[in-house]
Amino acid sequence: MEPTYDPTACPSCKGGRLYRHGVRDQHYVDAPHYGEPAVLLVRRRRWRCQDCSTLFPDPLPAIDEKRRATQRLVRYVRGRSLKYTFAEIGREVGLSDRSIRHIFDDLVRDLETQFEFVTPRYLGIDEVKLIGKYRCILTNVEANTVYDMLATREMAGLREYFRRFRNPKAVEVVTADLWNNYAVIAREFFPKALFVADRFHVQRMATNAVEAVRKAVRRSLTQKRRIQLKDDRYVLLRHGHSLSAEQMTKLKSWGDQFPLLGAAWEAKERFFACWNTKSRAIAARELDAWAASITGDVRPYFAELLTAWSRRRDDILNYFDCPVTNAYTESINRLAKSINRMGRGYTLEVVRAKMLYDSNALEKGTMTRRVAVQVPDDDLGGLGMGKIGYAAPAKSTGRRRVGYVTELVCMGAHIPTLCDKLESGAFE
């Protein structure tokens, strides 16, 4: 290719006395043509200014000089980098993984500027082990969306992040597991928010106790009986109301042979039954009675749960005042690990961006809301056009006139949509 026009002014002094100073062949990677990588060979002239001696090449407006590529290739890579691995894109367009990563980093910076997620009313906090370290995940429990992923769950990193947290007063409820760092952070940065211990993390402690008893019993069995008990594991861990008659028979058989196993299962079921009440006061009495009933050989297996109940009593009971859970975070854990596994060598930033900025998930996580705004007293016609959509007519509230604007806001990446895409193989 050759440029088709001559420059008319020096970029330094703006003088117009220019002359040719040779030609150089330069290569620029282009978007694929007919499924094959493409490279443009440009015969690029150089020019020198007679006034200031500045040497400069032909301007190429469609070229990204930093990438040595066309701008349409950069757009092509940006459009595919949230769906495919860097290695796949590199093979398709003829660029190195490193170059693809740099284009992706620019995309992420642009997306962070473009999408500003609304601060959740119900903030969920959990963690996932990713690339060898535990990472903190924040969710919007009310909207079932991913709000952010942090590089660490350690106290120093959490404090640094939450010092820059937008609009912390909007957070009304924080739900997390019983790891102490999360409770400390919630009380330090969201002092007026209600801290709710996540129900499923608490109930899992009871399930873990039964599993610990099963493993202890299994060690004393023959190889054949060990395999049999392993196969019946799901019977011990499921809720009693969901077991069939055949499964209940198996469960009774194991309980008759090993009374400790039967006692652990009964204790687990009684604990789960305490969560069926809607009253905080009744739940407190039932949980106290349950804790007092755990005695004898089975008590050591429930030590973790009993300790949590005695030390974090209020946090656990807060669930009965505000029944929110962070259950969807478990899906996020699996999703993050799957994305990381399918794109070997991904950094945390890549996994985070692929979750937070998936176009389908963002679309599902975007919704409308009404925002109250003040209206001047002489505005008799309402608000007219809102930020996005039309405003409702203003109404009088004593001395102030208040109107409502309907605006489109993004709550984050919709978790069920991300999980559906994972199941369909969209991330493979």
Image (cartoon, grey):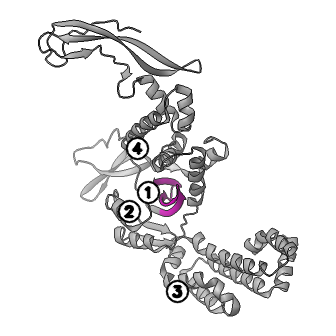
Q: Which mark is residue 157?
A: 2
CB-based contact (under 8 Å), mark 4 and mark 2: no
- Check the picture and name the quadrant holding the C terminus: top right
Query: Which residue occupies 38% across, 39% down?
Result: 110
The crowding category of the residue bearing disc 3, from other C-alpha atoms within 10 Å (few below 14, some 14 to 19, many at least 20), is few
**Which residue was labeled with disc 4?**
115
Query: Which residue occupies 37% across, 21% down?
Result: 63
Question: What's the CA distance linking mark 1 and mark 4?
Answer: 20 Å
Q: Secondary structure at mark 1?
A: loop
Task: Evaluate whether residue 26 shows in this view.
Answer: yes
| In this view, 33 is above or below 261 | above
Question: What's the CA distance linking mark 4 and mark 2?
Answer: 23 Å
Query: Which residue occupies 69% across, 88% down?
Result: 298
Foreground pick, 404 / 363: 363
Give the mark count: 4
**Which residue was labeled with disc 1?**
151
Foreground pick, 123 / 252: 252
The crowding category of the residue bearing disc 4, from other C-alpha atoms within 10 Å (few below 14, some 14 to 19, many at least 20), is some
Identify the mark nearer the N-term, 1 or 4: 4
